[in-house]
Image: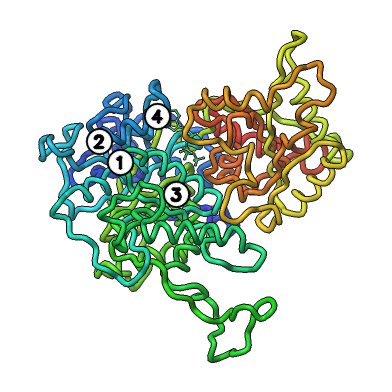
């Protein structure tokens, strides 16, 4: 049960255990008086006995789980018996319920993580309902009490809706309260009440379209802070201008009628901003704020053809004093092991605290799980993740010991609808092996009965390196298989839109069933036709881990190929999880050496993947 840190293993190379942290399940209190279920108490007691080395339990010797080196496997799910199994009003306000139904379809039922959210993250009563308990009988909270919560569940299990619903509802309730003071004019064009942070622009754009769909009836304003909101290099200026116009309209309240008149003239027209931490910081601190060189030091630093000084710091576009909610999506990336992301995210959190006149009280010595130093943020904080690496667990136990942890029973497992298959390299050209396997997938798509329509699968291929992505893309193109090869520096990566992912991302605002029907004409093809569809339009996307995080790929992505050994199981779970989403069937095909040198590594990986199976 004790946590281990992958970091310490990597650092020492000894495989020694890090001092044990308090396991999640040992926390009795969910938050301010909410106690965990009996189910959790049982596990808490087990955990405590195990931690104290008590021999009074007759526990079976546990089988070594190869994942404990990387992941916090002590996270326990609450029993699901007593949870809401339908979307209802309350706890949702009517308008939000209608949007959820429009978005997911009338038959949709909450996923496990959404049920947990409905129960625990709606502490405020709706107008007209008893004010001392919420819809689930739990005590309600004052406006001055803030939530800190981690939502953790497997890929494709609907975490975005699980965190968006409570946040959107609370923002709307605050807006409806006539006694809520309006934010003061900060002098900045944007003064949002909520931030959603995500690691990539692609994911930011997808999340903001999710939020917009859910706001159809309750009408709050969302802005996606894509990189091209402000002009940068001349080559980006077309989409920059478009995004700048959108932003301008939002600020002035002149765009489509969603903004209520009374807000149009205020600096508060945008309620929610979605973006990457670096983009958000840029909007808060001014463009170029992090450049080392100042104008005084280097007056002659110019970019391109002398169009713009690199060293000037732009005017801040956004102030933070009205922030009531912060969501950190892919929390293990933004809040965990990646130093750059971590620094930016922490900087945003402490800037908000400062702007809200409650600067964070950082401990002089680093906290540990055994001597935690709670950071109390003056806003609601939701973290969302499909994986809890040990390093993140350690950090949370040290600085957020009273954080509510909502975990689904399938956390750290592959989605149950995802099958795994292993393919051995033949020992020849690996590109040939991949091509062969692709053709094999499409051959299996062809129905046995003649004159039936064919719907060819789309395939997502993950490589470790950009050079490998480009090389494989070129090889397949030469073989008559059009493909999209995307790396972080790809020319084709569009700024300000997700068009470079067209045909691969799920289109939101429709149920999966509607989508399939809508997409059939372009995908279907008579089996008597000469050229199969996969030779006419890209059915293969090749990329690195860049696109492995959070993106909701279309149900037509039936296969994920992992052609380079993933760096760790966290990476594997996220890559594989781009298929088999929302209950759709999918398959992850793992390539590896089955004979000779290197085959042992494949064996170890198979064992680790086996431990992820639901
Ligand atoms: N209750 C539901 N019923 C059916 N489909 C749902 C439900 N909730 C969400 N979905 C759909 O499931 C898909 C995956 O949702 P989402 O992207 O939020 O998953 P996630 O858990 O955040 O995944 P990841 O960990 O990969 O980021 C989306 O297409 C969403 O519309």
State whether residue 585 appears in this view.
Answer: yes
**Quadrant position of residue 80:** top left
Q: CA distance from mark 2 to mark 4?
A: 14 Å
Q: Residue at x 32, y 38 (%)?
A: 217
Q: Do labels 2 and 3 touch, CB within 8 Å? A: no
Circle 3 residue: 329
Circle 4 residue: 102
The mark nearer the N terminus, 2 or 4, is 2
Q: Residue at x 78, y 17 (%)?
A: 527
Q: CA distance from mark 3 to mark 1?
A: 23 Å
- Image height of 150 relative to 343, above or below: above
Circle 1 residue: 218
Q: Do labels 2 and 4 touch, CB within 8 Å? A: no
**Viewer-nearest of labels 2 and 1?**
1
- Image height of 110 relative to 31, above or below: above
Q: Residue at x 66, y 35 (%)?
A: 560
């Amino acid at each position: 049960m004790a946590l281990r840190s992958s970091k310490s293993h990597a650092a020492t190379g000894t495989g020694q255990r890090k001092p044990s942290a308090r396991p999640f399940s040992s926390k009795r209190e969910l938050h301010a008086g909410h106690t965990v279920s009996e189910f959790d108490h049982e596990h808490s007691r087990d955990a405590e006995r195990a931690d104290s080395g008590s021999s009074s339990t007759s526990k079976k010797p546990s089988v070594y789980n190869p994942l404990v080196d990387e992941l916090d496997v002590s996270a326990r799910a609450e029993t699901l018996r007593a949870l809401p199994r339908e979307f209802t009003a309350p706890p949702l306000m009517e308008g939000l319920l209608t949007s959820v139904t429009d978005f997911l379809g009338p038959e949709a039922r909450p996923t496990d993580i959404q049920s947990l959210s409905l129960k625990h993250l709606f502490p405020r009563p709706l107008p007209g309902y008893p004010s001392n308990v919420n819809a689930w009988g739990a005590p309600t909270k004052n406006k001055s009490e803030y939530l800190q919560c981690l939502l953790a569940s497997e890929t494709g299990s609907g975490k975005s809706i699980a965190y968006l619903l409570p946040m959107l509802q609370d923002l709307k309730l605050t807006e409806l309260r006539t006694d809520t003071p309006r934010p003061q004019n900060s002098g900045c064009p944007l003064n949002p009440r909520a931030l959603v942070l995500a690691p990539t622009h692609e994911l930011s754009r997808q999340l903001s379209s999710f939020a917009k769909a859910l706001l159809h009836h309750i009408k709050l304003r969302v802005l996606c802070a894509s990189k091209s909101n402000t002009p940068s290099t001349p080559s980006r200026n077309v989409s920059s201008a478009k995004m700048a116009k959108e932003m301008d309209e939002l600020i002035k309240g002149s765009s489509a009628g969603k903004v209520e008149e009374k807000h149009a003239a205020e600096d508060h027209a945008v309620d929610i901003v979605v973006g990457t931490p670096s983009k958000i910081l840029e909007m808060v601190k001014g463009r170029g704020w992090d450049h080392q060189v100042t104008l005084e030091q280097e007056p002659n630093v110019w970019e391109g053809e002398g169009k713009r000084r690199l060293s000037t710091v732009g005017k801040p576009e956004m102030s933070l004093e009205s922030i009531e909610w912060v969501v950190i999506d892919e929390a293990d990336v933004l809040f965990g092991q990646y130093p750059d992301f971590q620094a930016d995210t922490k900087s945003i959190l402490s800037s908000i605290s400062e702007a809200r006149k409650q600067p964070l009280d950082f401990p002089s010595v680093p906290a540990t799980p055994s001597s935690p130093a709670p950071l109390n943020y003056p806003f609601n904080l939701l973290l969302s993740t499909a994986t809890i690496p040990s390093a993140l667990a350690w950090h949370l136990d040290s600085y957020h010991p009273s954080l509510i942890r909502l975990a689904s029973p399938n956390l750290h497992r592959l989605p149950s609808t995802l099958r795994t298959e292993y393919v051995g390299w033949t020992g020849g050209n690996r590109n040939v092996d991949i091509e062969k396997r692709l053709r094999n997938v499409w051959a299996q798509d062809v129905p046995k009965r003649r004159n039936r329509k064919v719907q060819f699968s789309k395939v997502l291929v993950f490589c470790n390196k950009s050079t490998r992505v480009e090389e494989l893309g070129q090889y397949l193109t030469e073989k008559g298989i059009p493909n999209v090869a995307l790396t972080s520096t790809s020319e084709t990566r569009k700024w300000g839109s997700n068009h470079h992912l067209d045909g691969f991302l799920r289109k939101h605002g429709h149920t999966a069933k509607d989508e399939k029907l809508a997409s059939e004409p372009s995908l279907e093809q008579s089996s008597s036709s000469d050229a199969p569809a996969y030779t006419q339009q890209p059915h293969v996307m090749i990329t690195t881990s860049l696109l492995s995080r959070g993106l909701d790929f279309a149900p037509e992505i039936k296969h994920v190929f992992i052609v380079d050994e993933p760096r760790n199981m966290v990476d594997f779970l996220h890559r594989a999880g781009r298929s088999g989403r929302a209950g759709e069937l999918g398959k992850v095909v793992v390539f590896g050496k089955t004979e000779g040198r290197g085959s042992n590594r494949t064996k170890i990986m198979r064992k680790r993947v086996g431990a992820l199976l639901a």
